[in-house]
Amino acid sequence: MKLLQRSLVARIVASLLAISAMALISIVVTMAVAGGSRGDAAAINVAGSLRMNTYQIVAALQRFERTPSMEHQAEVHVLKRRFETRLASDNLTGAIPVSEAHELRQQYRLVLSRWHNELAPEVSQAVASQHVRVEALNRALDGLVGEIDTMVTQLEQNTEAKIRLLSALQILFLGLTAVVVAIALYDIRHNLVAPLRQLMVLARETARRNFSHRTRLRGSDELAMLGSTFDDMAEQLASSYAELEARVTYKTQELERSNQVMRVLHDGSRWLYGGGNDLCTSAAPMLRQVEQLLEIGPIRLSINDPHEDRQIPILATHAARRPEYCRDHDCHACLIDPNPMTLPNTEEGECLLLPVSVGDEMLGTLEIWHARDRRLSDSVRRLLNALADQLATAVYLQRRIEEEQQVSLMNERTIIARELHDSLAQSLSYLKMQVARLERMQSKGSPREMQAAVFDELRTGLNSAYRQLRELLTTFRLKLEGSGLQSALQQTTEEFSDRMGAPVELHYDVPPHLLNPNEEIHVLQIAREALSNTHKHAQAHWAAVTVQFQNARIVLRIEDDGVGLANDDSPPMHYGLVIMRDRANTLGGELRLANRAEGGTRVEVIFTPQTARLITRQPVEEPTIHDHGN
């Protein structure tokens, strides 16, 4: 019973089994009743023929009485045997119930009794005496016929009772089947169709992402449990979907915020790397935007002192006062005016300390404060690490730029000192010796003609020193104002083109950063000295300066279409050519002078740059060191 209450399938199966059982019982009962009615019609026919047979016996007796003969006598005996045979036949006895209490059985016994006790003795006596007692025979015949009629009537009633029983059973089973079907249909409608409709509605609404619909099925059968499970599933789906939407929204916002932060970092990189030495002005706007986007702050940047083991705070966003080591009091990058930010949620919050480092070199630290109730996600931490790396790169580049500036300044000073020593210092030393010579001549009272020659040499030396000074000033002014050797040579060719009144071409094909500053100065001075000689002595209408990098060597060529040289050797005591030759030797190269086949002069200097020289030596030095180590 509990199974039927808990299981819809069990109830449907029970209904089908009940309907099938009633149909089977109805068929079996019908077959049994039909089987029990088999032979009733034959029994009624036999019973009816008994009544006819009695009349035939009486008629035969009457004929035998009128005309006694063996034929009539035989006919009487045949009819008598036929009556007895039919009375005892299976067709008749088979339709009569076996129970002695049944009225049909009692009526059959009564017919047998009247036949054997009344009519059969009268027939036997009439045949034996050939005399028929009509009155006694008619009384026996009437009594027997009456009993036969009663038996026939009972047989008919018995058959009709069976038919009524069969009809009643059919109606009963039909009614029971209708009741079972009605109960099953009611159960199917309320416990199968309606729940299935609710489940279909729930499935359709769930497919439309409407998780608020519920079946609200009650019961303990399968569909009720399925509906309850679907309700729980819809509730869980609604919760999961809402949580997923919240996570997607959060992730979308976080991605948008990360994208904005990355854009700020990208834009801030130009501020950092293009802001000169002022890291505060270039980094503070970027840090403030990162704070606003990530809802954190303040951010403090401290730099390690390379000389002392301490950290120097140089930048703090939302600061109430300037950093201790602020260098520019006209800058307000760290300050928020007029209301500096109070830090109840940050000073008392948590601090994320990130290293500002490049490789193994620790440059400083970056303090990032945030509220305690705000957890920094992995993506935010990655962005902050990228910020720290960007600041580290900016600080490192700033230090490298400062170091390069110091090195460049020292190189420039060294070059200036060398140039002064090689040119102006020698000239001044020569003038000093001439002054000492003039003093000795005056102290000895030398003739005025001899002193005039010394004065001429002093004048020539002073003019040469002044010219060298102007050349040095012009050279260093070109170097400082230009962006490299090519720019300085371009200005030089333009200068001498104006001075000569003739075109001076420049052909430059050298990779950038190949020559060091000292080599650039020597190349520029050689070119200027050669163009100066062309201007003074060549009477040229065209000149060209060519600088090329060929076969790991620098080729400097100055050509003109002037009068040329008397021979390929430099003129004796020509001070400018001597200086050019000394500069070529300093570069580790050689100076060549020759006349051009087309006319004019060619001055050529070929040397190996220091950079190419180091590259060439590198493969040779490494095996030597390796062998020594072994």
Image (cartoon, rainbow, N blue to C red):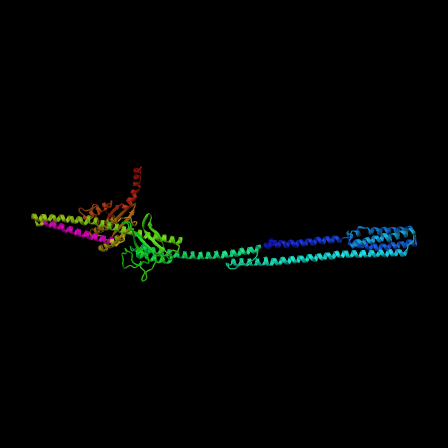
Q: Position of residue 234 (x, y in %)?
A: 51, 57
Q: With 26 as the anchor, is 68 left or right in this view?
A: right
**Nearer to the camera, 33 or 289:** 33
* Most common secondary structure along the magenta stretch: helix
Query: Does the magenta portion include 456?
Result: yes
* Residue 381: x %, y % from top left: 38, 53
Q: How many marks?
A: 0
Q: State the extent of the magenta-drawn residues as a range.
A: 450-479
Residue at the extreme left: 445
Residue 416 in percent (x, y) is at: 22, 50
32 or 386, which lies in front? 32
Classify residue 628 by image quadrant. top left
Question: Is 93 left or right of 261, judged from the image as shown?
Answer: right
Residue at position x 85%, y 54% in the image:
54
Viewer-side residue, 144 vs 51:
144
- Whether residue 27 appears in this view of the structure is yes
Q: Is residue 622 left or right of residue 185?
A: left
Of the 4 image quadrants, the one containing the N terminus is: bottom right
**Residue 227 place in picture, x, y as percent:** 55, 56
Q: Residue at x 71, y 57 (%)?
A: 168
